[in-house]
Image (cartoon, coloured by chain):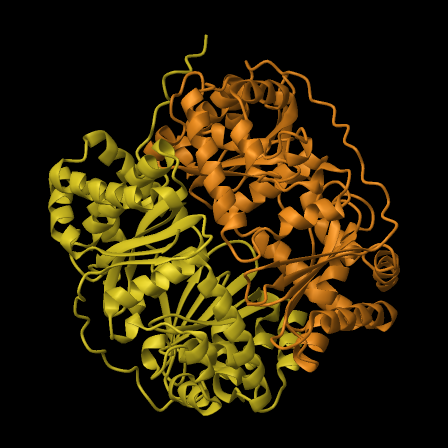
Amino acid sequence: MISFQEFTLDNGLRVIVHEDPSTTLAVMDVIYDVGSRDEDPSRTGFAHLFEHLMFGGSENIPNYDSPLQRVGGENNAFTTPDLTNYYISLPYQNLETAFWLESDRMKQLAFNPNSLEVQRKVVIEEFKQRYLNQPYGDLWLKFRPMIYQQHPYRWATIGADIKHIEDATLEDVKAFFYQHYVPANAVLVVAGRVNFDEVKTLAEKWFGPIPGGVKPLRQLVQEPEQKENRKMEISANVPSDRIYKAYPMVGRYQPGFHAIDMLADLMGRGESSYLYEHLVQNKRIFDSLNAYQMGSMDPGILVIQGQISEGVDIETADNALEELIQEFVQSGIVEKSLQKVKNQAEASLVFMEVEVLNRAMNLAMAANAGDPNWVNTEAEKIQAVSLSDVQSWAKRLFIDGKSNTLWYKKEKN
Amino acid sequence: MLDRSTPPPAYPIELVKFPTVDVFHLSNGIPVYSINLGEQPVFKLEIISPAGAKSGEKAGLANMAANLMRRGTQSHSAQVIHEAFDFLGAFWDIQANLDNATFSVYGLNKHFESLIPWVAEIMKEASFSQEEYEKEIAIEIQKNKLNWQKTSFAASQLFRGQIFGNHVYGRYSSPESLADLSRNDLFDFYTSTWVNVKPIIFLSGKISDQQLQLLDRFIGQLSFEASWPGNLPIVSPQAVQIEHDRREGALQTSIRAGKLAIGRNHPDYFKFSILNTILGGYFGSRLQNNIREDKGFTYGISSSIVPLQESAYWVTGTDVNGENSEQTLEEIKKEIRILQNELVSEEELELVKNYLMGSFTGELTQAFDIAEKIKVIQLENLAPDFYDQFQKQIIQCQAQELREIANQYLNLDELHVVMVGA
């Protein structure tokens, strides 16, 4: 149970406070409701590039990091397809420094041209380091456009192409800031050894004067229903063949999400899971097999991925996997296994609450999605999943015409 | 009108007293270091055996033996064991590093009693069956091939090989060396370490006496015949080399540059650690400012001290745009020379001191993080007040001392360099 109180400033900024006097830290988490799904298709990767620019100085503070480090704090940020999250942790007595820094860059970014030039290069190196210079690193760059043909999830958060990052201009940066980085489009969480009344006073002092702006209306093209199985093969200099499969599912806050989450765990979480037992352990067709769902806010995907054992033909492996998925749908979903994955999910939730920063981040995510108290109802929702829920979702997900399969093959020497 | 250009008042960061650690001895003499802190009903149990890479005759033994320990006992198949841990919602792993191996279990307190008998069984009765051996070796070989394709992995391995030469710390495995490990090699390694040598236990989280009693009931009754192994041959400095393993088609170059260094048991360690922070140990470091924030050659660059039980090394690492690898190396050297010749400004030193003190504040309020530090103190035989001393030394550190340290411990003539990629 994560206790919290909340209030909303006149400019529309929603503020959530979680007091935990047992720590000597204070943390601040800010989510802006903008991610790579909100990008222009010809300017992909921009939300993430912009996140880098948020560290390039604001109207009154030329350097974001140093003043924070000077008072003993640390910070970082990340961008997802759905949102952008910034977080700080620092000794509690210096909490006001976090308010000062975070409010100034929400009020007015510096738009420093040099910062754009440098961060453009840094992001291109990040693109190479994570996606191009790693075995299988380009998988999602290739797989997303096959799974999503309309919805902006079809490009990765890093961007569809390095060229889009090269082409970004300062005008783009300004437009993006004025449209998305407004109080009405943000959620602020303050947690740790903090006091509600003090946070309220500080929030009014530092964030209160910022003009509220208008929360942008999100009108994304939704993905049409998939009607045929899709398949693609790519090959590269990798040591093993791999199979990736994706099946369309509901979004993070839609009915059925928890049942599908349990379904993925039953199939492929850890070495006692159904897929592992049959195809890694018993038949020795795969060296590894995992299933998971992406947790995206718009309708997402359940992914199954496996690395094929040396000497096994990829087609044989795929047939065995397809056959096993059908066997699982028919007879593999049983009460004891469901109880197991529920126990695993329960433990994960408790462990998530150990760190105060995680608690703050989860409150912010839930608030951004609609209601901060969703962090506290998660456990009941998991327990409420019934065997028949999971079985019926399995039958709906794994039907002919709904699969996306990618064969990632090693190049023949 | 609110003045946004003046920072709010900054308050000094208070020293955090390192907590008193409870030591409980099981009936067979195994020490259990425990730290009870936090509200969530969780625990982290870590059992440490001297089953690290340095105890093995061949490269890869320790790591492979750790893998196989997870794959079945004389009484239970791997499937049954994994099912049992997963059903109790516990996360567990066995990992070997250069010095030791750790059997870790994270779980909810209400399942502690059900989990411990499994832990005891795996410590003593892992089966290393022929079938699991064949499967796990085949999987590990593929994993190893994949790792060697990553330029950053390859650079780290080759760098360690260069620093330590023929010493066991310099060994690394390859698909060929893995294929050469027999089932008997692995089982003998397991027997001579986990089965025979009395381990050390660390327990953290919301801990109760009842948990200690349970440890005694199941692990306190096991018998161990051997004591911890003695010291290894002394590490001697190797001839400096500059190695560049070029890979066709690579877009980046993974650079590792560094040398043998002093470890935590050396009186200059604290100052060396502060110096490392300034150079490459935090996000605002000089290397990060120069190579990333000024030149945009990389997504990130950092330097770190890697203390081992019988040696230590210092390394700086980055993945840079292929065209800029030589220039990056020159800039690394340049930053070291500046530290050797010029004094760090009071402003920068103050910032780094506060940053480090702030990190301590964060790390000393959470049970699992404290347990990490207790482990360091015990495994490296440090004074119990090591982390209190560390904080005091941070506060007292002077710029002149750092310049001396830079000259003494970062001699550029001793810099080993490995580059892999473009």
Q: Is residue B198 left or right of residue A89?
A: left
x, y percent for residue A377: 73, 47
Q: Is residue B24 above or below residue A52?
A: below
Count the marks: how many?
0
Q: Which residue is situated farthest in the top direction here?
A: B1
x, y percent for residue B304: 30, 52
Confirm whether residue A192 shows in the render: no
Q: Is residue B167 left or right of residue A380?
A: left
Residue pictured at 30% horizontal, 62% vertical? B159
x, y percent for residue B79: 66, 80
Q: Is residue B302 left or right of residue A252?
A: left
Q: Is residue B36 left or right of residue A412?
A: left
Res A119 → quadrant: top left
User: Which residue is more in the foreground, A47 or B398?
Assistant: A47
User: Which residue is more in the foreground, B350 or B323?
Assistant: B323
Chain letter for the orange colouring in the rendering:
A
Image quadrant for the C terminus of chain A? Answer: bottom right
Confirm whether residue A40 shows in the render: yes
x, y percent for residue B397: 17, 42
Residue pictured at 50% horizontal, 17% vertical? A108
Q: Is residue B375 above or below residue A44?
A: below
Q: Is residue B156 above or below residue A327?
A: above
Chain letter for the yellow colouring in the rendering:
B
Residue pictured at 55% horizontal, 37% vertical? A162
Res A222 → quadrant: top right
